Amino acid sequence: MAHGMRTDTYPPYLDGGGRGWRDTATRYALLPLRVFLGVTFIYAGLDKLTDSAFMKDSGAGSIGDTMRAVRDSSAIPALVDLALKNPVGFGYAIALGELAVGLGALFGLLTRLAALGGALISLSLWLTVSWASEPYYYGNDLAYLMAWLPLVLAGAPYLSLDALLHNRRRQRSGGLS
């Protein structure tokens, strides 16, 4: 008599028919991460855009002074030097990038692209501003980089504008996509 190994010890569906609670939880597992990253990056972008001290070449709290302070301790000083050619322009680029990434993630529009943008912003900040954090886990940019990667891979297939657009395309093509 052959015995099969059963790895699923719970009934597949608790409601007797449709999807079980585990399937539902799995389906929406990335939603809290997407909301957190979206709101956080929107806030970060708006905070920079509305902080008059930040958007200056020099002075307490300015992007210019921050970049000069981290230049020698960064992993890629040339990246900081590039930003220092126009610190205010770089500050606006980061702030608007964070805003666009946050909106894309929160609303699930071009989510993979937004997540890639968020990962690249986090990577650049990790290699420059928080590189000297010791131990490494004190710098939050590396954690944000890792948090963006599941959204780069999976996108936002549920509760998103991407899903809505995909469903419309599928309906128009007769369900073939």
Image: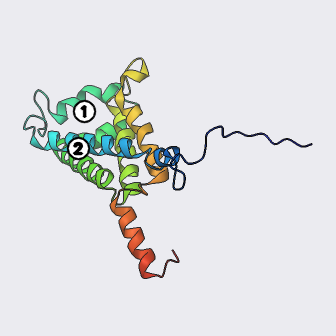
Q: Which residue is denoted by mark 2 in the rendering?
A: 85
Q: Which of the 4 image quarters holds residue 156?
A: bottom left
Residue at 40%, 32% in the rendered image: 143
Disc 1 is placed on an element classified as helix
**51 shown above or below 138:** below
Disc number lying in front (2 or 1): 1
Relative vertical location of residue 22 with respect to residue 107 in this rendering, above or below: above
Q: Position of residue 126 (x, y in %)?
A: 37, 33
Q: Position of residue 34 (x, y in %)?
A: 36, 46
- Residue 41 shows in this picture: yes
Left or right side of 128 for 3: right
Front residue of 163/58: it is 163
Q: Residue furthest left?
A: 52
Quadrant of res 40: top left
Label 1: how many residues lie within 10 Å, few (<14), some (14-19) or many (20+)? Answer: many
Residue at the spot 36% in from the left edge and 42% down from the top edge: 32
**Which of disc 1 and disc 2 is earlier in sequence?**
1
Q: Tag 2's secondary structure?
A: loop
State the count of labels: 2
| Residue found at x 50% / y 49% | 15
| CB under 8 Å between discs 2 and 1 | no
For label 2, count other residues whose C-alpha is less than 10 Å away and answer few (under 14), some (14-19) or many (20+).
few
Q: Please give the residue where the numbered disc 1 appears in the rendered image.
A: 67
Q: Can you say whether 126 is above or below 168 in the image? A: above
User: What kind of residue is marked 1?
Assistant: Met
Q: x, y percentage for residue 78?
A: 36, 38
